[in-house]
């Protein structure tokens, strides 16, 4: 809105990121996609924003005010200008595969739209799953597409952008708790990740918002959240706090009580870190009004009952100084949140630093939290360090303001 042209480079077929997967946001309990979707559309329609999806940064040269950024755009095999987003191609496609958006619990087709509110509203073909690319047969999507938008001959395209400044906002990934064998993730069906639960209770999720246990498709009677899975770890995992887990577990616990009023909900935590505005009140509401039970304890082992598929949780009850057990029919793990692996590539081509955990380093985390050691390169969001959505938005505004300063001064200087 300051008059500068902006290029938004997105690796996925749609913008939206992790926030698009969430059901509600804390502590207001607002609909996540209701906040996000209008902003995505506004971004797509803005005359000064060029949205480059399915694209990656390969090389960067130059300096502040005059960066040369080489972008590689991977083929969708769907013509952006012709596709109307009608969905006929996906409806007719015979190939079903696990949906990444639904954390593998739902399915999508080999030609698909990432999620219903995807921007741009254009389908993409998964080359690794498509029968035509793998076996040379099918082309059903091409046959039924009313807009004749399918193009199996699309190739990778390279382009070089001239930009004054760069903002990195690569997001996060989830720690894989399968490496902590005592928790039974991927071994016991009723042990889920918090983001998997988020998709289950979402109206657009694989069960259309109905909360069911994966082993029996029945409504759960008792659910236990396990905090600090892979974070603040002494042996397995990462030493830092992921910042948001206490709050999103509380949010999900409240949502569970709304969906299943008779279901008991326990949150087993090491320390409650609820430091933001209205955060403590949010936890108080969960505890006092929703009857969510907070237990100060570290989990040692989760064992499945082979007959009932219930889960027996053995934990150290820190408050009482003894070993205790809790039986639940669903366990939700709140894993550590980590920087993405492609941060290493970006750090190398931009010559900026990464800290010991893989987050982008800034000049000063308090006084200059968005400025890297390279002039004209800024960071925002979780790629700089653990933070929630509100903090990420605030930091993004700061990074945009600093980037715009350089763009304006470059134009003024001719």
Image (cartoon, helix red, strand yellow):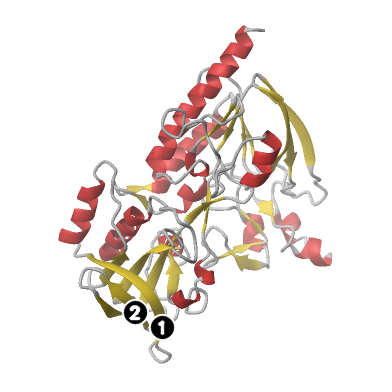
Give how far across and how far down residue 174 sits, in percent.
51, 58
Please tell me which residue is depicted at 72% across the width and 43% down the height of the picture: 79
**Residue 337 locus on image (x, y percent):** 48, 54
86 on left or right of 132: left
> Among all residues in the image, which is located at the extreme left?
288
Could you tell me how far apart the alpha carbons at marks 2 and 1 are, in whole angstroms? 8 Å
Res. 391 in view: yes
The vertical placement of 268 against 285, above or below, is below
Using the image, determine if residue 329 lies above or below residue 308.
Answer: above
Residue found 37% across the figure and 79% down from its top: 218
Would you name the residue on which mark 2 appears? 314
Q: Circle 1 is placed at which residue position? A: 303
Q: Secondary structure at mark 2?
A: strand
The answer to whether residue 3 of the structure is visible from this angle is: no
Q: Are marks 2 and 1 in contact (CB under 8 Å)?
A: yes
Q: Is residue 151 left or right of residue 202?
A: right
- Describe the element under mark 1 as helix, strand or loop: strand
Q: Which residue is at the front of the view, 236 or 327?
A: 236
Task: Write the residue at 32% across / 48% down.
Answer: 26
In the figure, is residue 75 to the left or right of 395?
Answer: right
Answer with mark 2 or mark 1, whichever residue precedes in sequence: 1
On the image, which quarter does residue 254 sit in? Answer: bottom left
Q: Quadrant of the C terminus?
A: top right
Q: Nearer the viewer, residue 376 or 103?
A: 376
Farthest top residue in view: 413
Q: Which mark, by number, is residue 195?
A: none
Looking at the image, which residue is at 40% across and 53% down? 241
Local packing at callout 2 (Cα closer than 10 Å; few below 14, some 14-19, many 20+) is some
User: Residue 333 in the image: x percent, y percent?
Assistant: 41, 66
Determine crowd level at label 1: few under 14, some 14-19, many 20+ residues with C-alpha closer than 10 A.
some
| Residue 209, x across and y down, in percent | 39, 63
């Amino acid at each position: 809105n300051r008059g500068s042209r902006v290029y938004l480079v997105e690796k996925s077929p749609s913008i939206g990121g992790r926030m698009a997967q969430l059901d509600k946001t804390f502590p207001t309990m607002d609909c996540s996609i209701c906040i996000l979707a209008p902003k995505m559309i506004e971004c797509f329609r803005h005359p000064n924003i060029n949205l480059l999806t399915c694209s990656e940064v390969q090389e960067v040269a130059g300096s502040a005010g005059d960066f040369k950024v080489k972008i590689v755009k991977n083929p969708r095999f769907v013509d952006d200008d012709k596709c109307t987003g009608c969905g006929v191609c996906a409806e007719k496609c015979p190939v079903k595969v696990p949906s990444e958006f639904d954390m593998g619990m739902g399915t999508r087709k080999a030609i698909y739209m990432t999620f219903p509110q995807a921007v741009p509203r254009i389908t993409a073909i998964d080359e690794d799953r498509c029968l035509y690319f793998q076996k040379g047969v099918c082309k059903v999507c091409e046959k039924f597409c009313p807009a004749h938008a399918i193009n199996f001959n699309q190739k990778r395209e390279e382009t070089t952008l001239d930009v004054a400044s760069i903002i990195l906002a690569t997001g996060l990934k989830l720690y894989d708790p399968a490496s902590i064998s005592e928790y039974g993730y991927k071994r016991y069906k009723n042990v889920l990740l918090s983001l998997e639960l988020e998709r289950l209770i979402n109206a657009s999720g694989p069960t259309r918002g109905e909360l069911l246990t994966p082993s029996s498709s029945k409504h759960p009677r008792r659910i236990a959240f396990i905090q600090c899975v892979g974070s603040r770890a002494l042996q397995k995992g990462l030493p830092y706090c992921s910042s948001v887990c206490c709050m999103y577990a509380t949010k999900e616990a409240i949502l569970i009580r709304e969906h299943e009023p008779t279901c008991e909900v326990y949150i087993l935590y090491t320390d409650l870190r609820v430091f933001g505005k209205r955060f403590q009140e949010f936890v108080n509401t969960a505890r006092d009004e929703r009857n969510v039970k907070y237990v100060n304890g570290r989990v040692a082992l989760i064992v499945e009952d082979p007959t009932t598929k219930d889960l027996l949780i053995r934990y150290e009850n820190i408050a009482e100084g003894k070993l205790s057990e809790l039986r639940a029919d669903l366990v939700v793990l709140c894993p550590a949140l980590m920087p993405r692996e492609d941060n290493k590539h970006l750090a190398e081509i931009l010559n900026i630093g990464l800290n010991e955990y893989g987050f982008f380093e800034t000049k000063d985390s308090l006084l200059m939290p968005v400025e890297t050691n390279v002039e004209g390169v800024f960071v925002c969001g979780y790629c700089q360090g653990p933070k929630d959505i509100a903090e990420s938005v605030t930091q993004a505004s700061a990074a945009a303001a600093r980037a715009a300063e350089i763009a304006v001064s470059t134009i003024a200087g001719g």
